[in-house]
Amino acid sequence: MKRAMSTPDHKLSREERLAAKLRENLRRRKSQAKAQQEAKPGKGEAGLPKGDSKS
């Protein structure tokens, strides 16, 4: 049985909707990361050591 939803037109619109959601999510995550960086000035790379950590 074939579904009406599997037509190329529907797939294209679904892909466009998903792409739009991904772009929206990326913008939201970027703004959240920026807000976190502004809230914690001077922290930099979350306290990671800069030198080699060979034991």
Image: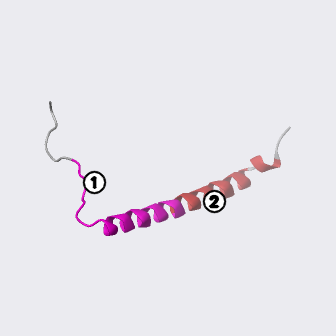
Describe residue 29's horizontal placement relative to residue 48 as left or right.
right
Whether residue 20 appears in magenta in the rendering, the answer is no
Q: Nearer the viewer, residue 38 or 14?
A: 38
Q: Residues within 10 Å of mark 1 (few under 14, many from 20)?
A: few
Quadrant of the rendered image containing residue 55 = top left
Q: Secondary structure at mark 2?
A: helix
For the residues marked 2 and 1, what is the alpha-carbon distance in whole angstroms?
35 Å
Quadrant of the rendered image containing residue 18 = bottom right
Task: Identify the residue position indicated by label 1 in the image.
Answer: 46
Which amino acid type is shown beneath numbered disc 1?
A: Ala
In this view, the residue farthest toward the top is 55
Report x, y in % for residue 54. 15, 33
Report x, y in % for residue 35. 38, 68
Image vertical order of residue 51 relative to residue 34, above or below: above
Describe residue 34's horizontal placement relative to residue 19 as left or right.
left
Describe residue 39's horizontal placement relative to residue 53 as left or right.
right
Image vertical order of residue 25 relative to residue 48, above or below: below
In this view, the residue farthest toward the right is 1
Q: Residue at x 42, y 67 (%)?
A: 31
Task: Identify the residue position indicated by label 2 in the image.
Answer: 17
Report x, y in % for residue 47. 23, 52
Report x, y in % for residue 25. 52, 60
Query: Which residue range is magenta in the image?
Result: 24-48
Describe residue 16's horizontal placement relative to residue 55 as left or right.
right
